[in-house]
Amino acid sequence: MHLQQAESSGQGADQKAPKAFTEQSSSLPFGQHVSLQSINGPTYVTAQTLVQQVAYTLSDKMFAYSAESFDLDTAVKHWQEQGEKNAFGYQTGLSSLETRTGAGSIALGYMFSKDFDLKKRHIPQSIVATTATLQYLRPALDQLSLLYSVANPLVAHVAAVDYNISSPTGLVADYASSMGLAEDLGLGLVCSASVFETQHMALFSTLLSSVLPTIHTFDGISAGRETARLVDALDNSRLHEHYQNVLKAVSEVDKKHLDNAGRTARLLQAFNDELGEDYKLFDYYGHEQPESVLVVFGTVEASLATQVANKLSQDGARVGVINVRVHRPFVEEAFLEVLPRNVKTVAVLGQVADEAAVFDPAEYSLLYADVLAAVQFAVSGNVEVTDVKYSREQVWTPSNILDVFQQIYGEKPGAEELRSYVDILDTADVRQYAFWDLDASPAANAPLALGKLLSADSSKNVFVRSGHDNLVNGGVQRTDIRSADYTIEAPFSVDQADVSFVGDEALLKQFDIVGNAKADSSLIVKLPGVKDEDLEKKLAPLLRKSLVDKDIELFVLDPTLSESVYEDPALEGYLTQLAFLKVARDDVASSDLSKLAAINGSVEILEKLASELQSALREVEVPAAWATVEEDEEMLQLAADISVNSFAAFDPTETEPPSLLKSWQIAAKGLAFKEAYGTQSALRPDLGVKTAVVRVKEHRRLTPLTYDRNIFHIEFDLGDSGVKYAIGEALGIHAENDKAEVETFIKWYGLNPDEVVEVPSREDPDVLVNRTVYQSLLQNIDIFGRPPKRFYEALAEFADDEKEKKTLLALAGAEGATEFKRRAEVDTITYADILLEFPSAHPAFHDIVRIVNPMKRREYSIASSQHVTPNSVALLIVTVNWVDPQGRDRFGQATRYLNSLRVGSPVTVSVKPSVMKLPPTTTAPIIMAGLGTGLAPFRAFVQERAYQKQQGHEIGQVLLYMGSRHQREEYLYGEEWEAYQDAGIITLLGRAFSRDQKQKIYIQDRMRETLNEIREAYLKEDGAFYLCGPTWPVPDVTAVLEEAVKTEWEGAGKTVRKGDTRREIERLKEEGRYVLEVY
């Protein structure tokens, strides 16, 4: 992400271009690279940067296993490019590797290769990876542990992060994998409890690797990527000096006479002596005489639990926390030393694999097993040890940590009542800001630049963290900034924002942004072109009420009122920064802007934007009337926060798969030597769905030849195709273009129809399919479809004629919107028409494959039940045809194809599930409303009910309402309906032929005439309602159902308020009793 440099013209064109603020990675401080030498003394860093610094400084070689955008080695790569050297006088080697089977083998091979320089045997080797890599590293680490006495020291810095596709959060903090691997292979395991001790623990882990292979783990989602100020960061020389001194302090006698646990404790003592620290294997915090103690492992877990316990103990609650800094080796003596003597309950906050393990009584956490063994065999008295399990998906906040203490202490008899809310930050001293924006916003980088600006004040400690949810609104990002006079630990999202900025109004409808704002705070919302009188319509009722209840100041930022931004939209990021400073830090906004210009922009541009801010930013009075919400207003439950599922903004660009023209000889080689070329034969391999070939069994027109609408019944023989379909499902028709039109286009465009084109499958780019040009145009390329705007833009790149190029670009832009709409909706222009109209734009065929959309299957509701017709499937089709303004006959591609088929013709089909399903019980009534070909699924429904009755089942009422223009011409399947009615299958047949009388009668009119029957079947007998056909009757039909509900309720003496019937229909919809399939 970066702010585009402004390009100006006209007045002021010769002024200096503004400086852009670029985010290289979210793992870097303020998203920017730092030099290796700059990490020294007071400096802003991230935990990930510190880990890479220690690994780079003290390693001979690094092996990085980093997924794309995780950027576990991005700083190291930068330092290598800058020629930075490690503590041993040379550049640390870096191998960036893929996470897959065999990971770690290259590290083993490097250390034990014949040409390895044995003089480097004492120098550590480092791995940087995520917990997702550990399962692939396991075999190599297992071998290494057996050969460790003759190997280099090895430390693995493991970010506790994995991606869980089944989790709503996406990214999960995984400590359980590291704990399991360390236990199984006898590895050391150290955890950093905060960003402030990450550098020290990375150093200690590297020292511990001289004793045994060691994993150093730390939070990889939030705390590990948060920019924070470290007061006394160690530079390269000091790191090396401390490393050497500690190793010297640990004597050879210690190495020979102590076990791993003893050597670890001795090493930590020497480490503390060298650095002047007081780190322990286990740290206790909280009440001096606690009754309940919580044992925790993990960065966020330790930080939050410690702070919450301290707050509660200040209230008199007898609770405490033990933070496990070194889990392996688990030194029981050290644990028991910090465990208070009078404790009654030891609860272990232990991570397990998933939610299923949380609720499985047979599963327990690894940490629980260690604590239980230590306590039961060494502590006298009745001490209860419990396992408070949680899954990797758990996102910890002060609130849910408080819930844990309530569970282990507050619910016990005689315990002090715990507070219901805990704020670990003093909100009077800490300023908190929250930015919510879209990834595509021009102001996406604004909060990072602001954080960088605020960090220039040496009297403040600034903290910046951001996250991305790429599954919402095309990519949403949230950035939090905290500013305090002292060092704080807050590894959770801002929930008491002093100022909140919202970059798009859609975010207000998806996230409870005001719920995360402090009372008497400020809210800035970007609303381009919105006037004050229209503001109430833009804000949801609950949001308006919250603004009043919390006494929040509302500001509207309208970038369109800034002349500079109007001329150059890339300047919006600078305007946003100035707007924020005006509201949050007016002292900075009104001072010299050179400090901000040093980060991004220029003084001239910032000063001009500051003068325009008076127009672009306005405070809006929040009326007291907004506190009142109508009773019928729906209170939607909004998400409190984004689900962080990415570390980078969503990239909407899609790389187009290459396409290659080949000779028939090359394609023949692939078919002849399938194993060598990896060739597979498949039916329509370009399609990502299961397809089959069926043949036309019956093709029967249902409307007279003299009638202007051709509606026909077509039935396919399934033969041995194996096609199975259920009631209500749809049949996908993989149609072909008209052969004559394809041949005409090939001849006009000058193509060789027999040339072989190789293109990746649209469903899987790794699968290549071979087709001739003729086959591709017949079955793959929608050359006679309607082109979108992007086709005009793409075609312009091939135009040699400048006039044609300008016309194409204009049609793709805003200025050509009217003409584009006319072409699409009136002239119904096709891709082929455009290529004919602009002859200078003549892309090669492989480019046509790239820029023209592929043909899509067309789906039609199945009009038969396979129980009744086991070897066939039927459809009800209306031919789509019209005449364009030039007098040319136009046709719908799929219906034209189907209408051209004769009995015996082969057709490629596939089956697609649908929402149109019969009720689970045969006795439940069904009410069906179908217009025109919308009757298709109901023919299948009625056939199925007839079959159920024939099988001896009791069936419920069947009400069928059908609508069309004329009974004589469009009484579709009329004889069948009447026969089913005579047989007692259909209990009510409501026919609405709108144009057979002067007063038009529609389907909703027939329903209203039989309202009592609908009430009986739908409401009293718990029936289901279905509507299939065009969208226009939906409001009227729904109104009839609401009328039925109202009548039923009033008859029962129930008071019906406005909106009640609508909500009842919504409830029925959720139960699957109000089903629409409209188009």
Image (cartoon, rainbow, N blue to C red):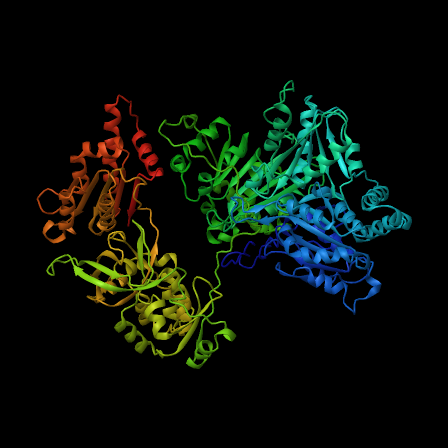
| Residue 226 shows up from this direction | no
Left or right? Give the position of 516 relative to 256: left
Q: Is residue 931 above or below residue 113?
A: above
Q: Residue furthest bottom?
A: 665
Image quadrant in which you'd find residue 42: top right
As rendered, which of 753 and 388 lies closer to the eye? Answer: 388
Left or right? Give the position of 170 relative to 772: right
Left or right? Give the position of 756 relative to 384: left
Image coordinates for residue 452, horizontal then vertical, percent: 64, 46
Q: Residue furthest top?
A: 414
| Residue 815 shows up from this direction | yes
As rendered, which of 822 and 774 lies closer to the eye? Answer: 774
Q: Is residue 477 above or below residue 842?
A: above
Q: How many marks?
A: 0
As rendered, which of 647 and 969 lies closer to the eye? Answer: 969
Q: Is residue 959 above or below residue 136?
A: above
Q: Residue furthest front?
A: 952
- Which residue is found at the position 46% from the left and 40% from the top? 510
Image quadrant occupied by the N terminus: bottom right
- Which residue is found at the position 81% from the left and 39% from the top? 277
Image coordinates for residue 723, horizontal then vertical, percent: 33, 59
Q: Is residue 672 above or below residue 1067?
A: below
Left or right? Give the position of 267 relative to 299: right
Image quadrant in which you'd find residue 494: top right
Image quadrant in which you'd find residue 955: top left
Image coordinates for residue 293, horizontal then vertical, percent: 70, 29
As rendered, which of 752 and 979 lies closer to the eye? Answer: 979
Image coordinates for residue 126, horizontal then vertical, percent: 73, 56
